[in-house]
Amino acid sequence: HAQDYKEIAAKDKLTDLQLRVRQLIDQVEQITKEQNYQR
């Protein structure tokens, strides 16, 4: 079970990282839209 827990923890960390990356991408897209709108 310890091995399973390590795998689950690794997946959770990966999911958390993916979530943060997705948030950054959304912020960049929002800034890009605002810049395009200002032109």
Image: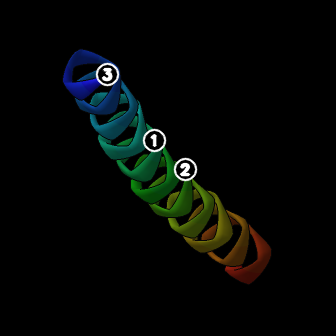
Image x and y of residue 29, in percent? 63, 57
Looking at the image, which residue is at 31% across and 44% down?
13
In this view, the mark in front (2 or 3): 3
Q: Of marks 2 and 3, which one's residue comes earlier in the chain?
A: 3
Image x and y of residue 8, in percent? 39, 31
For this view, does 25 lie left or right of residue 12?
Answer: right
In this view, the mark in front (3 or 1): 3
Crowding near the residue tagged with mark 3, few <14, some 14–19, many ≥20 C-alpha atoms within 10 Å: few
Q: What numbered label is drawn on residue 18? A: 1
Image x and y of residue 15, in percent? 47, 41
Q: What numbered label is drawn on residue 8? A: none
User: Residue 9 is drawn in which quadrant?
Assistant: top left
- Residue at mark 3 to residue at mark 1: CA–CA distance: 16 Å
Crowding near the residue tagged with mark 2, few <14, some 14–19, many ≥20 C-alpha atoms within 10 Å: few
Looking at the image, which residue is at 53% across and 62% down?
23
Q: Quadrant of the N terminus?
A: top left
Q: Amino acid type of disc 2? A: Arg
- Answer above or below: position of 10 versus 24: above
Q: Which residue is mark 2?
A: 22
For this view, does 2 lie left or right of residue 11?
Answer: left
Q: The residue tagged with tag 3: helix, strand or loop? A: helix
- Answer above or below: position of 7 versus 10: above
Q: Which residue is mark 3?
A: 7
Q: The residue tagged with tag 1: helix, strand or loop? A: helix
Q: Are marks 1 and 2 in contact (CB under 8 Å)?
A: yes
- Residue at mark 1 to residue at mark 2: CA–CA distance: 6 Å
In front of the other: 18 or 25: 18
* Total numbered labels placed on residues in the image: 3
User: Residue 32 is drawn in which quadrant?
Assistant: bottom right
Q: Amino acid type of disc 3? A: Glu
Q: Amino acid type of disc 1? A: Gln
